[in-house]
Image: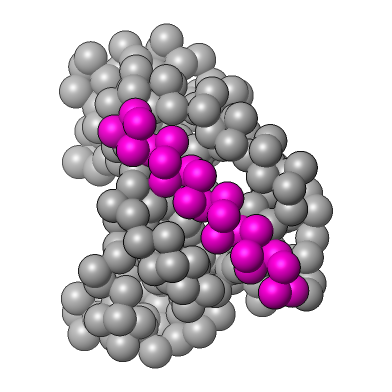
Amino acid sequence: MVFVDLPVVERVRRIHELGFAVEIWDWTKHDVDALVALRDEGVVYSSMTGYVRGRLADGQGADELLATAAESVPVAERLGIPRLNLHGTGLDDKGLPVQPAHEVTGRMWLQARDTLARLAELGERHGVQFVLENLNTELDHPGVPFARAADCLALVESVDSPHLRLMLDLYHAQIGEGNLIELCRRALPWIGEIQVADVPGRCEPGTGEIAYPAVA
């Protein structure tokens, strides 16, 4: 995140002035009308968190995830956002799982796949795309299930819908898996959006160990 000392509206405006699109986290904590007004000024929103609460891999959590995803879609439509971001489980304000899962069972895989298929159907009905983001559990998000890019990709492939794609975060992938060039080649047909930052520090490309010219 950047310009964290500024109010959200001013942060969005500054990011736009620098020529970047903006990602919105947890729309319930923002003044949506103000964000819509910024869109009218020319701000482009690339994606937003596509749920408020819920989990992929258990029945009750899946129902809550679907319900809050359905609440999020109209907000995305107002903001002109084509992609709604998902994670393996709900995250708190620090990016930690509300309900950690340090072991993922076969039953959880099947439930996650079913939940994502239902989300893809929701996306198809409304003309939006849900994107499942990989995270790293080593440093930033311990206890998040289905965090590896390989796991996210396997789930997206199994659903096989244009309304469910991979949000490939290369910062997280470098920490958790590495081998980014082959990962990008493998994932390319399934990618909805790519996010970049360097390792260590999560700063701009070129400040760390990732050879972004080679990856690109």
Q: Nearer the viewer, residue 211 or 44?
A: 44
Q: Is 112 colored magenta in this rendering?
A: yes
Q: Quadrant of residue 215?
A: bottom left
**How far across and how far down the image is residue 6, in percent?**
49, 29
Q: Is residue 52 above or below residue 131?
A: above
Query: Residue shown at 40%/78% (left/top)?
Result: 208
Q: Is 144 colored magenta in this rendering?
A: no
* Residue 63 seen anywhere in this rendered image of the structure: yes
Magenta stretch, overall SS? helix
> Disc count in the image?
0
**How far across and how far down the image is residue 108, in percent?**
70, 65
Q: Quadrant of residue 196?
A: bottom left
Q: Nearer the viewer, residue 55 or 177?
A: 55
Horizontal side of 13 relative to 103 (left or right) equals left
Q: Is residue 26 above or below residue 188?
A: above
Query: Residue shown at 39%/89% (left/top)?
Result: 179
Q: Quadrant of residue 187?
A: bottom left
**How far across and how far down the image is residue 159, in percent?**
42, 60
Query: Residue shown at 29%/33% (left/top)?
Result: 127
Q: Is residue 178 above or below residue 188?
A: below
**How far across and how far down the image is residue 130, in percent?**
41, 46
Numbered range of the magenta stretch: 105-127
Q: Nearer the viewer, residue 93 or 86?
A: 86
